[in-house]
Image (cartoon, grey):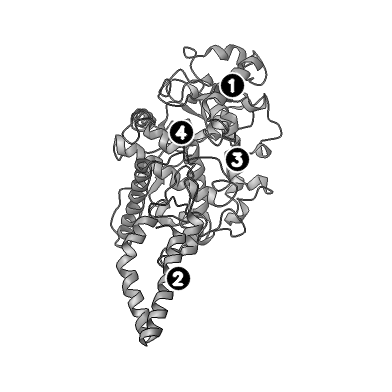
Amino acid sequence: MCIYQQKTFKSHLFRVFNRFGSRMHIDRTLVCLLLTVLLVAILPNIEAEISSFQINSTDHKTDCFERGINIICFKKFLQPVAETLNDTSSSNFLNALLRKINSESDTAAKSRHRRKAVNVLVRRELRAGPYETNFLRYALAVRRLKNHFGIRPDMSTYDIIAVIHTGSTREHRGPAFFSWHRIYLLLYEAALQSVFGRGVTVPYWDSSLDEAMGNRQARTILFSNKYFGTPFGEVTDGFFANLPGMKIRRNIGATAALIPKNGIAAVLTRTSHSQIVRRDQRRYYWEGYHDRVHRWVDGTMASGTIAAFDPIFWCHHAFVDYVWELFRKRISNAPADYPLDFEEHPPEGQMRFNSYKYRPNPPITNREGFRNKYARLRRYAPAPSCQNLCSNSQDLYCNGMRDICVSLERVNGETFAQDVAAFPAFGVPQGPDYTTLQAIQQAILQDMPAGMPLNLFDVDEIDPNTRGLSVFDV
């Protein structure tokens, strides 16, 4: 029975009972009572049919369902059939991950009230030692998730999670950027744990360690076979080469910039969220610093619609979340400090995972994502510093003159064909030549579904002194 039919049926019942009551001189109160009994009898069937509709949960008040069957609410939820993932198995999997997250957060909150110790998982900088239980564990978990087809036979479980990220303004350009991506990270980790065990977490990528390399940034050891592999063109080396699904491509250092330490310090001087979410306050706009790194890695990472298909995406966002958590701990009453003047990020708007027709259950609002119950699900090991021996990493060193840790370069035995062109004897690193860029661009566009917008990360937030050419500027 559709919504319109329910309304018509309801009106018809009222007319029948009113006539019947008038003819038989039955009191109106008795008529209403009989109508109530009848509706209660058929209500389960109505609810079952309503649940079969495709529902979008972003644009409604949180008490919509608490007030029972509400015609206006359900009309707002009805969505067209054209969605990317419209299969029940994918939606059920997503909802199972959400329930896992909420269950863990509730358990942690109860344990905290009872002063019981809780084993909280820790995210470390990806080069922090020991390598075997940090980055290596993450890389192996990603490979297993990319080769897992237990939810859909035509799409890996990794890709089911990655396709959720669309780069839309409901996920970006406002305070919900922080809470949406926090929950998204937890979803991804829950998926990794489902195939690799509970101990795996996403290590964070502190890109300031690579920014500190100056004009040698593009030689960072991060893009070696030990970590993320190929820096230019299609990824053909390392853990993430030749995996099922969309090919990963990069063009590191051709444009934009990494996050400088003084940028992080500037953000952490602010005292409210409203001061770090506005694009006109560029020095303190944390999402703007985040945009730079997407553009610096370039290729797959430069497009919001496919960025999550590169496993470095998650490590970058873990660092964004880490700095946000440092910020939260420095301000008073952080959970309640949700900026209100962002039309597309209303505090009570429910987080939408755009590629799914079905409402995430249980839903989480933008404001709820600011709560401590989700923040406490993970701890962050301190960023590498000279004081903590650069997190005992074999791939970082302490620059005593500057008192900061800096990434090592790729070793001579592990170079790439593009490096010859990329690094002249002197001067600023260059990206591949124009012809190579065109080839990368065409390959990426071929991987993207027809009609899908590029949805690039904000060009306005790029440092004015950027160099080179982005893949999508060709």
The Cα–Cα distance between marks 3 and 2, rounded to whole angstroms, is 56 Å
The Cα–Cα distance between marks 2 and 1, rounded to whole angstroms, is 58 Å
Residue that mark 3 sits on = 289
Decide which of tag 2 and tag 1 comes sooner along the chain: 2
Q: Nearer the viewer, mark 3 or mark 4?
A: 3
Percent of width and height locating residue 166? 53, 40
Residue that mark 1 sits on = 442
The Cα–Cα distance between marks 2 and 4, rounded to whole angstroms, is 72 Å
Residue that mark 4 sits on = 390
Q: Within 10 angstroms of label 4, few (less than 14), some, or many (20 or more) residues?
A: many
Q: Residue at x 59, y 30 (%)?
A: 296
Percent of width and height locating residue 404? 54, 34
Q: Within 10 angstroms of label 3, few (less than 14), some, or many (20 or more) residues?
A: many
Decide which of tag 4 and tag 1 comes sooner along the chain: 4
Residue 372 appears left or right of 260: left
Residue type at tag 2? Ser
Q: What kind of element bears circle 3?
A: helix
Residue type at tag 1? Gln
Residue that mark 2 sits on = 11
Vertical comparison of 173 with 464: above or below = below
Q: Residue at x 59, y 11 (%)?
A: 420
Instruction: Decide which of 46, 91 is in the foreground and name it.
Output: 46
Q: Quadrant of the C terminus?
A: top right
Q: Nearer the viewer, mark 2 or mark 4?
A: 2
Decide which of tag 3 and tag 1 comes sooner along the chain: 3
The Cα–Cα distance between marks 4 and 1, rounded to whole angstroms, is 40 Å
Decide which of tag 3 and tag 4 comes sooner along the chain: 3
Disc 3 and disc 1 in contact, CB within 8 angstroms: no
Q: Residue at x 49, y 58 (%)?
A: 75
Q: What kind of element bears circle 1?
A: helix
